[in-house]
Amino acid sequence: MEKCLRSPFVKGEVIGVSLLKKPLHLLTIGNGPFLVHWNGGFHGNEWVTSRILMEIVLELLELLDKNEAWNGNSLKDLFKQVRLQVVPMVNPDGVDLVIHGEDKAASYQELVKQLNYPNRTYSSWKANIRGIDLNKQFPSGWEIERNRKPAYPTFRDFPGYGPLTEPESKAMAQLIIKEPADRLLCFHSQGEVIYYGYSNKQPKVSEDVVKKFQRVSGYEPVRTFDSHAGLKDWFIDRYQKEGYTVEVGRGVNPLPLSQYDKNLEKVKRLAFQSLIRG
């Protein structure tokens, strides 16, 4: 993060804090009228998405610094037309728990032990530090998820006792409400698919754009999926703008680092493509 913030091409700010008071960073590049938003690290055991996004941001900044083109596109000219927002890690508490173990849970240590039972490690942990799934916290279809998912906090899938109860999900909603993006990409793992619809409220352009994403990444577009209360779902439902959930890689989360270079290359091509309007 510090390396990014030293670049003259990026603006850094904190949009909120987690339950354990860790900052939720927002990076902004460019000053164009078309706003593209990327986020990752919603789920603790999907931390690879945060690492991938940070590596892509660093490459963008390096290309800008050297005034180099990408795929025939001048990035300096591109960022006169586009502004990019990146929240690389929405759930820092969950990520720390998965990577470093319960010592990182601080005052929640006994709680996470209980909620993680019968798992012996935290590799299955998706939730925030008090057992709420941050990507099932948004108002669109929340009641559907509440009625069919776990009824109490646990290591995955519990949508909370109401929508937007958690500081992390609140911060993301407030960011979007303050200035809705024109195109939103939420990076998760795994499956190598791109979900791009919700309740048939997605704009027509989404179908053309997702085909371009497929062409550069090989990820399969999926318009409808029986899932609700995610950030992408709420974004499309509320604003009828382009929203995509990109599922990175294949396998069991956390995805093995042996796949990292391959996944990085596919996501990089998709992420760069997302900066091209139309």
Image (tube, rainbow, N blue to C red):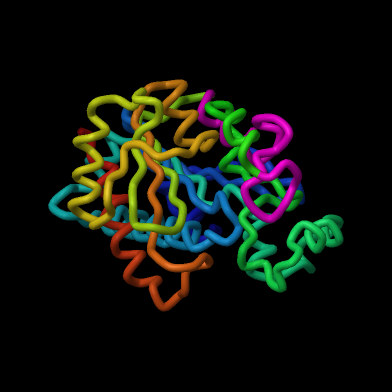
Give coordinates of residue 167: x percent, y percent: 70, 38
**Residue 43 seen from this side:** yes
**Residue displayed at 62% across by 60% down:** 95
**Residue displayed at 45% across by 75% down:** 257
- Give the camera-side residue of 70 and 230: 230
In the image, taking residue 205 as reference, residue 53 lies left or right, namely right
Give coordinates of residue 202: x percent, y percent: 33, 27
- Give the camera-side residue of 21 and 203: 203
Residue stretch in magenta: 150-177
**Residue displayed at 35% across by 65% down:** 263
Q: In the rendered structure, does residue 172 fall within the stretch colored magenta?
A: yes
In this view, the residue farthest toward the bottom is: 258
- Give the camera-side residue of 135 and 268: 135
Q: Based on the displayed image, in which of its 4 quarters is residue 67 positioned?
A: bottom left
**Residue displayed at 45% across by 57% down:** 189
Q: In the rendered structure, does residue 149 fall within the stretch colored magenta?
A: no
Classified by dominant secondary structure, the portion drawn in magenta counts as loop
**Residue 36 seen from this side:** no
